[in-house]
Image (cartoon, rainbow, N blue to C red):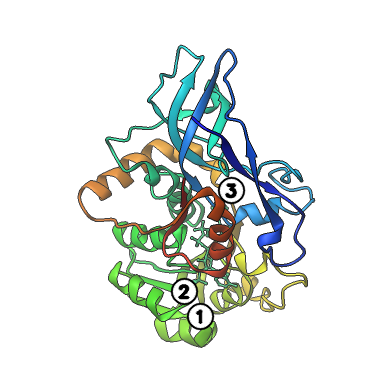
Amino acid sequence: MTGNREIHLANRPQGWPTEDTFRLVETDVPTPGPGQLVVRNQYLSVDPYMRGRMNDVKSYVPPFALDAPLDGAAVGEVVASESPDVAVGDTVLHGLGWREYALLDATSARPVDPSLAPVSAYLGVLGMPGLTAYAGLLEVAAMKPGETVFVSAAAGAVGSLVGQIAKLKGAARVVGSAGSPAKVERLRALGFDAAFDYHDGVRESLQAAAPDGIDVYFDNVGGDHLEAAISAMNLHGRVAVCGMIAQYNATEPPAAPRNLTLVIGKRLTLRGFLVNDHNDMRSTFVSDVSGWLREGKLSYDETVVDGIENAPDAFLGLLRGDNVGKMLVKV
Ligand code: NDP
């Protein structure tokens, strides 16, 4: 083991973060104390929620500290252990990403089995984004067979799984929106019945893709997507409000949705959720998703950026839409 490199938050961005938001810092590789482990991280997750943690505001997760390493999900190999419960060589999932070597209590590491799936999958399809898609669609939006489902950011980690799980669970029609023709093409290959590039106009494109309306909207974007979905909703439609990425870098309040009064007459349900509220579904989720993966019924994409020094680029790329599927950093 030589030195450790980690990414610190250098300043709090106003609007879009830039390269200057981050600082690459070299430190020593840590030494574990009693009950602790050192993990050599193999893959780091960059996620949209991290943008919110760069602001110094009260939220459901505390803000990142300035001049300290960022954190987030990571998987890696235990290289030193002072715990009887975890052995050197084990692969673990934990919350201290954005660094090459992580020092953590053994109790905060979750062992994963690298023989069951590539380790990166535990950050995506078999991890937090996968459970978000599964719980958001089936529990929060309570999708039923025969319904029409619309999902935005559909070529991303969560969205691409929402669309496929909807089909596997009997949706009659699944529509996805994404930010480029290549992504739209990918959605069709994944089995979406219709897909469109939102730059062509969300309202018109959604109407053409779902002429009989939609029953479920899985919202990853907010703004004009949410407005168009509310307009397209059938009676008793449900919106799983998962994310509003169109607003994460905004410095002004959003211009849409302007049509919330429709919620009344259509008897719509708009329900926000956090994935951590649905840990009770984890075992069913893992069993369903691993089964679908084994049977070749579910596909997942990953966009992998190499090197800790490029983690800021990976994060900025995620916000810009450079990723197809889960955005990851390979350390
Ligand atoms: P993605 O893999 O979907 O990556 C983000 C994508 O958002 C980009 O690829 C980009 O794709 C799209 N995007 C960025 N800006 C805009 C915009 N202005 N309008 C439309 N699309 C945009 O990320 P995740 O799958 O990890 O997350 C998806 C959503 O789910 C996010 O909103 C996130 O915050 C939320 N989330 C919520 C959780 C919860 O517990 N509630 C848990 C996990 C995620 P494109 O090229 O198509 O624009």
What is the three-letter code of the residue carrying label 2? Ala
Helix, strand or loop status at disc 1: helix
Residue 71: image location, x then y, percent: 62, 42
Between the residue at mark 3 and the residue at mark 1, the CA separation in whole angstroms equals 25 Å
Earlier residue among tags 3 and 1: 1
| Horizontal arrangement in the rendering, residue 144 relative to residue 8 (left or right) | left
Q: Is residue 266 left or right of residue 65?
A: left
Q: Is residue 35 above or below residue 129?
A: above
Where is residue 59 shown, x and y percent of the image?
73, 48
Disc 2, ligand 1: is the CB inside 8 Å? yes
Location of residue 267 (image quadrant): bottom right
Distance from label 2 to label 1 (Cα)?
6 Å
Tell whether label 1 touches label 2 (CB within 8 Å). yes
* Residue at 53%, 82% in the rendered image: 202
Q: Which residue is mark 2?
A: 178
Q: Is residue 219 above or below residue 11?
A: below
255 or 153: nearer the eye? Answer: 153
Across and down, in percent, residue 309 comes to 56, 52
Q: Which residue is at the front of the view, 91 or 42?
A: 42
The secondary element bearing badge 2 is classed as: strand
The disc at residue 274 is: 3
- What amino acid type should be assigned to the residue bearing mark 1? Tyr
The secondary structure type at the circle numbered 3 is: loop
CB of mark 1 near ligand 1 (< 8 Å):
yes
Crowdedness of circle 1 by 10 Å Cα count: few (<14), some, many (20+)?
Answer: many
Q: Position of residue 313 (x, y in %)?
A: 56, 60
Taking the image as shown, residue 72 lies to the left or right of residue 143, namely right
Could you give the CA–CA distance between mark 3 and mark 2, rounded to whole angstroms?
22 Å
Is the residue under label 2 in contact with that under label 3 (CB below 8 Å)? no
| Residue 56 appears in the picture as rendered | yes
Structural crowding at the residue carrying mark 3, measured as other residues with C-alpha within 10 Å and reported as few (<14), some (14–19) or many (≥20)? some
Q: Which residue is mark 1?
A: 198
